[in-house]
DNA sequence: CGGGTTTGACCCGCGC
DNA sequence: GCGCGGGTCAAACCCG
């Protein structure tokens, strides 16, 4: 039994029955309630057993916490949008609020185990000032999809036991469980500016009619696919010279194409694991080639493959990384086999790895995209794994369990 | 020979 | 219907 099985985090990612309010809808209602008290009546229909009278006078975080009957610890949020220009459709896609997380906290772990954000005692979210450098940050969008941005100029080093590596290196996964967590987090900021910013984001999204793909998802940023929208999608932006950072899984490149708006070709990869349909495509930022935009489409339902010719102590895939093409004329074109792992950048560092210059991530979960098929045993990567995590954060676990239970109770949402 | 990349052709959805 | 653009296929090729 995985230590996180008790949470069943993201066990099922199908939020949405049409009759049940989505978490976003719920939070939007909470937003409105900030400015319009009677909207709370709507919410009271959803949470009839909660006493929201006092909540109307408290912050939204407190109200959310009260409704889910758990105390959500406050988070530090800053207003920043430093990477807005890095995407092909930069201005409308990048929202502003950032959540700060501590250095050394794996973004993939963050996505897979969002409950850790709630840990009030382990202090996962310290002040960036204390880190002496640009903070890690998680960004949550005010638009119809979740966005998270993680940046950290400090070397990342996940302080986890080695046996946890596979879980935390297995690549990013985000589902709407994460989304609601992030949404709840961001709502902690009872700030007019914050709310206005939220609206501005929506306005910006709506203000770009020239992008035909956008309307499909109600203004959500649709970077890429026109057809393969049947699985969840996570977009990560990494500042790296690697053109395919190692994420612990093995990928086979099956295509490359120059897409509109970006002179840098996009490479398409499939997971080589049999019966695994996870794909990803990788492209350089249109405006800043330092940044690599990796889009994961789908969720691995298997363990990361053992590295060939290496011990079982770590994932040292020879094939996870390659410099397949010199998009920026900074590296020589290399055909055939990728460079050795020593040249490859590990996307998700482990505790065994030496500190690396992992700098920036950008993650986007398109909440509007259809969720994964309901499968009680799937939903996030490696959910079926034997327990590899012996560091459990009880408070966070309980918090998330409470959220899950409450959502299940009130919405019939099975997480 | 197995497993990877390359690359042009093709497929398909969408907007006009 | 047509064109555009993103995604995929598959033969050719590369490499250890």
Image: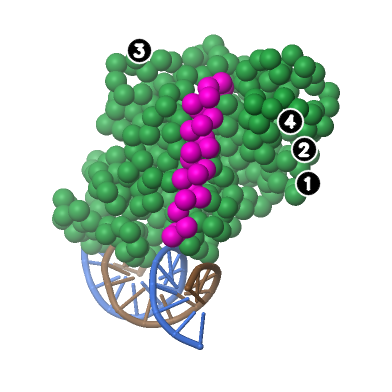
Chain colours: A green, B brown, C blue
Q: Which is more toward the observer, B3 or A400?
A: A400
User: Looking at the image, do the residues carrying marks 4 and 3 touch, with CB atoms under 8 Å apart?
Assistant: no
In magenta, the rendered stretch is A188-211
Give the distance between the C-alpha atoms of the residues marked 2 and 3, in whole angstroms.
40 Å
Of labels 2 and 3, earlier in sequence is 3
Question: Residue tagged by mark 4?
Answer: A39
Give the structural element (helix, strand or loop) at label 3. Answer: helix
User: Looking at the image, do the residues carrying marks 1 and 4 touch, with CB atoms under 8 Å apart?
Assistant: no
Residue depth check, mark 1 versus mark 4: number of the one nearer the observer: 4
> What chain is tagged by disc 4?
A
Residue depth check, mark 2 versus mark 4: number of the one nearer the observer: 4
Give the distance between the C-alpha atoms of the residues marked 2 and 4, in whole angstroms.
18 Å
Task: Name the image quarter holding the N terminus of chain A.
Answer: top right
| Residue A393: mark in rendering | none
Find out whether residue A196 is within the magenta segment.
Answer: yes
Which secondary structure is most common in the magenta stretch? helix
Find out whether residue A180 is within the magenta segment.
Answer: no
Of labels 1 and 4, earlier in sequence is 1
Q: Using a 10 Å C-alpha cutoff, classify the residue at mark 2 as few (fewer than 14 neighbours), some (14 to 19) or many (20 or more).
A: some
Q: Position of residue A19 (x, y in %)?
A: 78, 46
Q: Which is more toward the observer, A239 or A245?
A: A239
| Residue A130: mark in rendering | 3
Of labels 2 and 1, earlier in sequence is 1
Question: Residue tagged by mark 2?
Answer: A411
Give the distance between the C-alpha atoms of the residues marked 2 and 1, in whole angstroms.
9 Å
Give the distance between the C-alpha atoms of the residues marked 4 and 3, in whole angstroms.
40 Å
> What chain is tagged by disc 2?
A
Question: Residue tagged by mark 1?
Answer: A19
Q: Position of residue A28 (x, y in %)?
A: 64, 35
Q: Quadrant of residue A355?
A: top left
């Amino acid at each position: 039994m995985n230590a996180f099985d008790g949470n069943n985090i993201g066990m099922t990612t199908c939020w949405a029955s049409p009759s049940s309010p989505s978490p976003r809808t719920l939070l939007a209602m909470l937003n409105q309630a900030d400015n319009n008290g009677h909207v709370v009546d709507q919410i009271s229909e959803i949470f009839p057993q909660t006493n929201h009278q006092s909540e109307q006078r408290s912050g939204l975080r407190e109200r959310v916490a009260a409704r889910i009957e758990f105390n959500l610890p406050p988070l530090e949020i800053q207003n920043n949008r430093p990477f807005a220009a890095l995407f092909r459709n930069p201005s409308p896609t990048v929202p502003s609020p950032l959540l700060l997380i501590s250095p050394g906290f794996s973004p993939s772990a963050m996505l897979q185990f969002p409950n850790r954000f709630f840990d009030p005692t382990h202090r996962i979210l310290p002040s960036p000032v204390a880190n002496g450098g640009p903070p890690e940050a998680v960004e949550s969008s005010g638009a119809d999809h979740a966005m998270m941005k993680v940046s950290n100029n400090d070397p990342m080093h996940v302080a986890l036991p080695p046996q946890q590596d596979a879980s935390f290196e297995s690549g990013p996964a985000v589902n709407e469980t994460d989304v609601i967590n992030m949404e709840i987090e961001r709502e902690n900021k009872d700030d007019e500016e914050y709310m206005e910013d939220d609206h501005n984001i929506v306005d910006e999204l709506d203000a770009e009619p020239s992008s035909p793909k956008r309307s499909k998802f109600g203004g959500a940023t649709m970077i890429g696919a026109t057809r393969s929208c049947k699985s969840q999608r996570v977009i990560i932006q990494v500042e790296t010279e690697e053109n395919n950072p190692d994420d612990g899984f093995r990928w086979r490149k099956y295509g490359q194409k120059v897409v509109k708006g970006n002179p840098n070709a996009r490479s398409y990869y499939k997971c080589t694991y049999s019966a695994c349909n996870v794909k990803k495509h990788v492209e350089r930022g249109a405006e800043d080639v330092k940044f690599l935009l990796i889009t994961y489409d789908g969720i691995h339902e298997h363990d990361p493959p053992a590295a060939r010719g290496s011990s079982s102590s770590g994932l040292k895939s020879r094939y996870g990384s390659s410099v397949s093409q010199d998009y920026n004329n900074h590296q020589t074109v290399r055909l055939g086999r990728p460079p050795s792992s020593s040249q490859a950048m590990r996307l998700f560092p482990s505790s065994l790895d030496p500190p690396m210059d992992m700098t920036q991530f950008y993650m986007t979960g398109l909440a509007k995209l259809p969720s994964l098929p309901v499968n009680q045993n799937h939903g996030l990567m490696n959910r079926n794994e034997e327990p590899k995590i012996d560091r459990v954060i009880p408070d966070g676990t309980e918090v998330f369990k409470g959220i899950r239970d409450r959502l299940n109770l009130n919405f019939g949402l099975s997480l």
